[in-house]
Image (cartoon, rainbow, N blue to C red):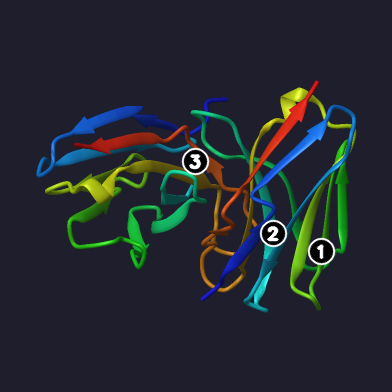
C-alpha cells in the first residue's frame, strides 16, 4: 500500500516569504507527527495530531510556524515570514494509534526547505 | 525531558565485518527504542525496535540489545553489505501520553566492498 507522501519534495523560498508543506499520511492512521531535521542532525519533534486535534505543539520553534489537520487526514505545516534558520528537511510521520508508545511511526520522504 | 546520545558519529567497516552503534538515554520512563535507517534523500525507515520488557531482539542480520539499568541500547549489524551504508538513528519514547520520539544525532555507516 501507499506510504506517507509529502509535497513538494523541494522548496526554495526567499527570506520573508510564506511556505506551505503538505503531508498525506497512511490511510486510516490516527496519529500524525511533524519533525524538523537540520543538516547532519537527527529529527526533532515539532507537533502532534490525533485525528484533527493538535494535542502537542511544544516543538514549534516560533509563532511563525503553524500546523493544521482539519479533517483528520492531510496535514499542512505553514511557515510565515521564512528566515534562513528555517532551512531544514521537514518530515511527516504517521502511526496507527500512537498514544501508547507502542506504534511504529512511518516517515515520509520529507520536504527540503531552503531559505535564501 | 529525554536526551539521547549516539556514537560513533561515523563508522567505516569492510564488507562482511560487524558494526555496532551505541546509544544512551536519560529518562528512566522511556520504554520504546526504535532504530531507523536513512538513505540519502529519503525519510527514516524503521529497521528494528525493542521495548523495555525484553533485553534483546534479532531480525536476520540485525539485532538490538537493551540495558535498562544502565540506560543504554545498541544496534548490531552482522555480515555487513555495501547496501547497509546509510545514516542510522536511534530514538526513545515513553508510554506517557503520545509517542514523541527523541532521536540521537545519527551514525554514518560506510561499508566498503
Q: Is residue A70 something one can see in this rendering?
A: no
Tell me the subunit letter for badge 2.
B
Structural distance between the alpha carbons of marks 1 and 3: 32 Å
Image location (x, y in percent) of residue B21: 75, 51
The residue drawn where x is 48% and y is 51% is: A43
The residue drawn where x is 88% and y is 57% is: B56
Image location (x, y in percent) of residue B96: 57, 74
Q: Are marks 2 and 1 on the same chain?
A: yes
Q: Residues within 10 Å of mark 1 (few under 14, many from 20)?
A: many
Write down the residue under mark 3. A28
Q: What secondary structure is found at the residue carrying circle 3?
A: loop
Q: What secondary structure is found at the residue carrying circle 2?
A: strand
Please tell me which residue lies in front, B31 or B81: B81
Q: Residues within 10 Å of mark 3 (few under 14, many from 20)?
A: few
- Residue B88, picture quadrant: top right
Write down the residue under mark 2. B33
Does residue A41 sit above or below A6 in this rendering?
A: below
Write down the residue under mark 1. B66
Query: Which is more foreground, mark 3 or mark 2?
Result: 2
Query: Which is more foreground, mark 1 or mark 3?
Result: 1
Q: Earlier in the sequence, mark 2 or mark 1?
A: 2
Structural distance between the alpha carbons of marks 3 and 2: 24 Å
Q: Is residue A60 something one can see in this rendering?
A: yes
Amino acid at each position: 500500500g501507499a506510504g506517507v507522501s509529502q509535497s513538494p519534495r523541494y522548496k526554495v523560498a526567499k527570506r520573508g516569504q510564506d511556505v506551505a508543506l503538505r503531508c498525506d499520511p497512511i490511510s486510516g492512521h490516527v496519529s500524525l507527527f511533524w519533525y524538523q531535521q537540520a543538516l547532519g542532525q537527527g529529527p526533532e519533534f515539532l507537533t502532534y495530531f490525533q485525528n484533527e486535534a493538535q494535542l502537542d505543539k511544544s516543538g514549534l520553534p516560533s509563532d511563525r510556524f503553524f500546523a493544521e489537520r482539519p479533517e483528520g487526514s492531510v496535514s499542512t505545516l505553514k511557515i510565515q515570514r521564512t528566515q534562513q534558520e528555517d532551512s531544514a528537511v521537514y518530515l511527516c510521520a504517521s502511526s496507527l494509534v500512537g498514544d501508547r508508545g507502542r506504534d511504529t511511526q512511518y516517515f515520509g520522504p520529507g520536504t527540503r526547505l531552503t531559505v535564501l | 525531558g529525554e536526551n539521547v546520545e549516539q556514537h560513533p558519529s561515523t563508522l567505516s567497516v569492510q564488507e562482511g565485518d560487524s558494526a555496532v552503534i551505541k546509544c544512551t538515554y536519560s529518562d528512566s520512563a522511556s520504554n520504546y527504542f526504535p532504530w531507523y535507517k536513512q538513505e540519502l534523500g529519503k525519510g527514516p525507515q524503521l529497521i528494528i525496535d525493542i521495548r523495555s520488557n525484553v533485553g534483546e531482539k534479532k531480525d536476520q542480520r540485525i539485532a538490538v540489545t537493551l540495558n535498562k539499568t544502565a540506560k543504554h541500547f545498541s544496534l548490531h549489524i552482522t555480515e555487513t553489505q555495501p547496501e547497509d551504508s546509510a545514516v542510522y538513528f536511534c530514538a526513545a519514547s515513553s508510554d506517557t501520553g503520545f509517542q514523541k520520539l527523541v532521536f540521537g544525532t545519527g551514525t554514518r555507516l560506510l561499508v566498503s566492498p
